[in-house]
Image (spheres, rainbow, N blue to C red):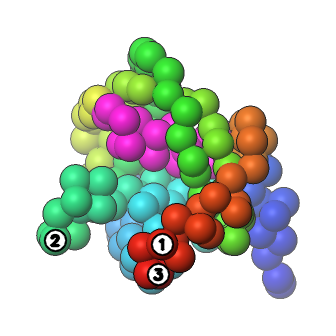
Amino acid sequence: MEIDKDAILRKHARKVDKFDERLAILLDDMAETMRAGDGVGLAAPQVGVLKRAVVIDLGIIEQSEEPKVLELVNPEIVSSEGECTVIEGCLSVPGRSGRVVRPEKVTVKAQDRNGKPFEITGEKMLAVCLCHEIDHLDGILYVDKMIEDATEEMKRRQEAKGK
């Protein structure tokens, strides 16, 4: 059976209620897929799994040489403040970029891979990543919130950097 990835990306992901080996394998596979795609974050629906799970590479956000993956299971934004306009891209929408308005700061409550609850507050890029990935869990893509296409601008920036 072939997975219709586009249809899955538009569905609401289900809450995780089993914190078992299958979840651990999913989170590990998601981190590997994110890194292989040079992504900063990845949500389970992007790999065809309708579960409320997200991984974010804090190493990239913190501009560290050390990879550091933040895992969020059943994440929920509990507060947000401020506003910033950023250019976003997405592993599920390759070759495109767009300007999106996001909160400048968010607090998210979630669980770790063992079910232990925690809260994290992210500002600037981390706030954007948290919002972007949690949107995926609700079937929302950045292109739905895009206020302006920025694909050509991003291509010029990457060429200037020599990528």
In the figure, is residue 40 to the left or right of 6? left
Look at the image and give the residue range highlighted in magenta: 122-139
Q: Please give the label number shown on residue 65.
A: 2
Q: Quadrant of residue 125?
A: top left
Amino acid type assigned to the residue bearing label 1 in the image: Ala
In the figure, is residue 120 to the left or right of 44? left
How would you rate the neighbour count of disc 3 (Cα within 10 Å): few for under 14, some for 14-19, many for 20 or more? few
Give the SS element for disc 2: loop
How many numbered discs, if any? 3
Residue at figure coordinates x 22%, y 53% from the top left = 62
In the figure, is residue 62 to the left or right of 157? left
How would you rate the neighbour count of disc 1 (Cα within 10 Å): few for under 14, some for 14-19, many for 20 or more? few
From the viewer's perspective, is the residue at label 1 or at label 3 nearer? 1
Q: In the depicted view, which residue is nearer to us: 128 or 34?
A: 128
Amino acid type assigned to the residue bearing label 2 in the image: Glu
User: Distance from label 1 to label 2 (Cα)?
Assistant: 23 Å
Q: Position of residue 18 (x, y in %)?
A: 44, 53
Which residue was labeled with disc 1?
160
Q: Position of residue 54 (x, y in %)?
A: 46, 53
User: Distance from label 1 to label 3 (Cα)?
Assistant: 8 Å
Residue at figure coordinates x 17%, y 63% from the top left = 64
Q: Position of residue 145 (x, y in %)?
A: 72, 37
Which residue was labeled with disc 3?
163
Q: Is residue 45 above or below residue 110?
A: below
User: Distance from label 2 to label 3 (Cα)?
Assistant: 19 Å
- Find the residue positioned furthest to the front: 160
Residue at figure coordinates x 38%, y 25% from the top left = 105
Magenta segment main secondary structure: helix
Can see residue 72?
yes
Q: Please give the label number shown on residue 57.
A: none
Amino acid type assigned to the residue bearing label 3 in the image: Lys
Give the SS element for disc 1: helix
